Amino acid sequence: MSHFAFNIILIFFPGIICAFLVDMFTNHKERTQFQFVLNSFILGVASYVIFAFFAFCIFKDYDINAVSFLRNSSNKDSQIVPNINEIFIVTIIAIFLSILITKTVNKKWHFKIAQGIKITQKFAEQDVWGFLFNSEKTEWVTVRDIDNDIMYDGNVRAFSDNSKDAELLLEEVIVYKNSSGEKLYEVDVQYLSLDRKNISIELRSGAEIKEENYDR
């Protein structure tokens, strides 16, 4: 690796960290190497701009050329010389930026805002499976396995990211015969790997399930 390339990577280290953290803590389609590099570049620039903005707000006479990233970007004749202290501070900013972006993506704030102002009705998840199980209303579910004539009542503990895998981890599970409602057995935790073409899923409230169990 050349000295020039090393300096470039060092300068964009905050963006790489930010993109890595966002990728780690959010669900998304697999990114290509180009997409990751592009995201790192954009997030790195954003982190340096935030740093420059706060520096100018705190120090009114702060010279724009004091920010080495902006100086190197605006002057084609200048040599790329990383400022380690600046990179360290911007990396801290990038970490906080990654937290904000991760929170926004996981809570779907950007989609909620867009839906609220009638820009789109699109939801953030990859498919309806993700939309269903990421909903705050989804707690207890009834899963009907039509082919095997089995019904599962349980509390959703974990689920796969998309309907292609159709995996569920249920707690406090009661299993019934679907056609007759005959109780078969109870189990604390049950993992299900399902054929999504042969199941139906119904949402139930926890209070409703517990009341039914009590009556029985």
Image (cartoon, rainbow, N blue to C red):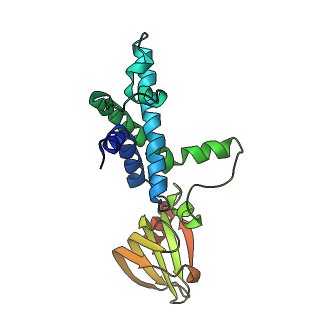
Judged from this view, the residue extending furthest toward the bottom is 148
Judged from this view, the residue extending furthest toward the front is 77
* Front-lying residue, 181 or 57: 57
Is 204 situated left or right of 25 in this image? right
Residue name at image x 38 percent, y 26 percent: 68
Residue name at image x 65 percent, y 44 percent: 114
What x and y, as percent, mark residue 91? 33, 36
What x and y, as percent, mark residue 66? 38, 20
* Front-lying residue, 177 or 109: 109
Q: Give residue 167's quadrant in the image.
A: bottom left
* Front-lying residue, 205 or 123: 123
Q: Give residue 43's quadrant in the image.
A: top left
What x and y, as percent, mark residue 6? 31, 43
Is 172 situated left or right of 151 in this image? left
Q: How many marks?
A: 0
Judged from this view, the residue extending furthest toward the left is 84
- When the figure is inspected, residue 89 is found, relative to residue 203, above or below; the finding is above
* Front-lying residue, 119 or 177: 119
Is 143 situated left or right of 18 in this image? right
Q: Quadrant of the C terminus?
A: bottom left
Residue name at image x 56 percent, y 60 percent: 131
Judged from this view, the residue extending furthest toward the top is 61
- When the figure is inspected, residue 199 is found, relative to residue 89, above or below; the finding is below
What x and y, as percent, mark residue 210? 45, 66
